[in-house]
Image (cartoon, helix red, strand yellow):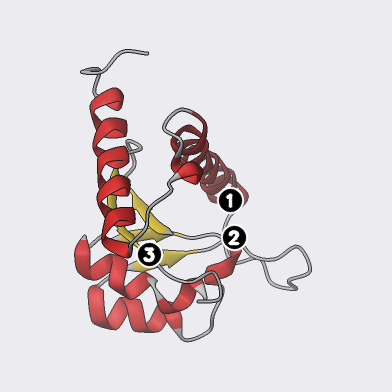
C-alpha cells in the first residue's frame, strides 16, 4: 500500500500494489489522484530521473533525504530536520492505522472486498482524526 498524506495527517490518495513493485513506479499514480506541489518521500524514492519527471509532468518537487553514504548533501541541516519530523508524522499515521484501526488484519476473499474494507478503515481514521469518533 502506497499512501499520500497531507501536512495535517489526512490520507489524500492510496495505491495498492504487490510488495515487489518499487515506490518509484507508483508515485505518479498517487499524484494523478491528488496533485501536490511537494512530495516528501523516503529513501525508496531515490532516483535520478524521478524528480525531473515529477517536475515536468506534475509541477511537483520531490524531497528525499540523502543516504548516509552520499558524498553530496542536497538539503540544508534545518530542512533535513524538518523532513525527519514530517517522515515521523507519516510513520505515525501508519502506526495508528495498524494498531487502532487493524489495517494489517484485513481478511477479504476478493480484491474488491479488501478495497471496500480499506476504504472503511480510512473513513473511520478520518472521522477519528477530525474528532467525530471517540476512542
Please give left or right for residue 17 compared with residue 34 in the image. Answer: right
Q: In this picture, is 134 found above or below 97?
A: above
Q: What residue does disc 1 label?
A: 80
Q: Quadrant of the N terminus?
A: bottom left
Say which of marks 2 and 3 sits in front. 3
Q: What residue does disc 3 label?
A: 16
Q: Secondary structure at mark 1?
A: helix
Q: Earlier in the sequence, mark 1 or mark 2?
A: 2
Q: Quadrant of the C terminus?
A: top left
What is the crowding at mark 3: few (fewer than 14 residues within 10 Å), some, or many (at least 20)?
Answer: few
Q: In this picture, is 22 found above or below 96?
A: below
Q: Position of residue 113 (x, y in %)?
A: 28, 55
Work out how far the residue at label 1 is from the one at label 3, CA to CA, in angstroms: 29 Å
Q: Earlier in the sequence, mark 1 or mark 3?
A: 3
Q: What residue does disc 2 label?
A: 65
Q: What residue is drawn where x is 59% and y is 43%?
A: 81
Question: Which residue reaches farthest right?
Answer: 69
- C-beta proximity under 8 Å, tags 1 and 2: yes
Residue 66 location, quadrant: bottom right
Amino acid at each position: 500500500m502506497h499512501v499520500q498524506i497531507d501536512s495535517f495527517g489526512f490520507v489524500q490518495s492510496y495505491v495498492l500494489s504487490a510488495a515487489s513493485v518499487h515506490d518509484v513506479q507508483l508515485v505518479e499514480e498517487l499524484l494523478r489522484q491528488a496533485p501536490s506541489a511537494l512530495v516528501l518521500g523516503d529513501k525508496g524514492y531515490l532516483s535520478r530521473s524521478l524528480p525531473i519527471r515529477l517536475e515536468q509532468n506534475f509541477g511537483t518537487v520531490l524531497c528525499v533525504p540523502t543516504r548516509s553514504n552520499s558524498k553530496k548533501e542536497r538539503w540544508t541541516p534545518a530542512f533535513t530536520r524538518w523532513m525527519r519530523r514530517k517522515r515521523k508524522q507519516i510513520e505515525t499515521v501508519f502506526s495508528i492505522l495498524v494498531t487502532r484501526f487493524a489495517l494489517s488484519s484485513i481478511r477479504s476473499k476478493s480484491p474488491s472486498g479488501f478495497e471496500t474494507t480499506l476504504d472503511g478503515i480510512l473513513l473511520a481514521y478520518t472521522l477519528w482524526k477530525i474528532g467525530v469518533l471517540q476512542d
